[in-house]
Amino acid sequence: MSKYEYLTKEGYDKLKAELEELKSTERQKVASAIAEAREKGDLSENAEYDAAKEAQGLLELKINTIEKKMANARILDVSQIDASQVAVLTNVTIKNVKNGKSLTYKIVSETEADLKAKKISVDSPMGKGLLGKKIGDIAVVETPRGNLEFEIVDISI
C-alpha cells in the first residue's frame, strides 16, 4: 500500500538535488566526524563517537525517506489539470464567510507545502476541506477552535 507523492517538476528536481547533497557532502562530513572521534580512544566512553554515529543514523533515515518519496512520486503536468474544481496544483481564492477576508492559496503536495509562499498541502485540514469544491461552493474546514466556512471565489492554474 504505497501512497503516491504528487509533485511538480520543480518539486521533484528540488528533492533530487537535496538527495544528492545528502549522499555526497553530508555523508562525507559524518564519516569524517566518526573517524575523528575514533582517533580519540576508547569508544565505550566517547560521547563524540556516539553523537557522530547518531548523526549518521539520522542522515541515513532522511536519505531513505527522500528515496521513498521519489520512488512514489508522480510528476504532475500543469497543462493536464482541470481548473473547474479545486485540485492539486490549482490556485484557489477563498473568502472567509464570517469576516469577508479573501486569500489565495496554491494546493500542493505535503513535500512542497510552504505557508509563507501561500502553498498549502492537500493533506492539511484546509487542503482537505477545499479539494473537489467548485466556484460558489462553501468549504467547511475543521479546526481545533471549530469549523470555518470559506466560499470558493476563483480557481485557476
Image: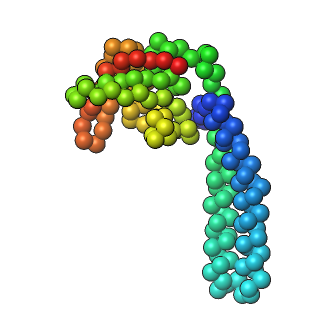
In this picture, is 6 found above or below 63? above
Q: Would residue 56 be found to the left or right of residue 90 on screen?
A: right
Please report the residue visible at 53 percent of the width from the left and 14 percent of the height from the top.
Answer: 82
In this picture, is 48 found above or below 131? below
Q: Quadrant of residue 26?
A: bottom right
Q: Nearer the viewer, residue 10 or 126?
A: 10
Please report the residue visible at 31 percent of the width from the left and 24 percent of the height from the top.
Answer: 95
Please report the residue visible at 74 percent of the width from the left and 85 percent of the height from the top.
Answer: 40
Please report the residue visible at 61 percent of the width from the left and 32 percent of the height from the top.
Answer: 7
Measured as percent of width and height from the top left, residue 83 is found at 50, 15
Q: Would residue 12 be found to the left or right of residue 142 on screen?
A: right
Q: Nearer the viewer, residue 91 or 41?
A: 91
In this picture, is 15 found above or below 4? below
Its colouring scheme is rainbow
Q: How many marks?
A: 0
Measured as percent of width and height from the top left, residue 100 is found at 25, 26
In this picture, is 101 found above or below 26? above
Measured as percent of width and height from the top left, residue 131 is found at 43, 24
Q: Quadrant of residue 73?
A: top right
Location of the N terminus by quadrant is: top right
The answer to whether residue 123 is seen in the rendering is no
The answer to whether residue 60 is seen in the rendering is yes
Q: Quadrant of residue 72?
A: top right
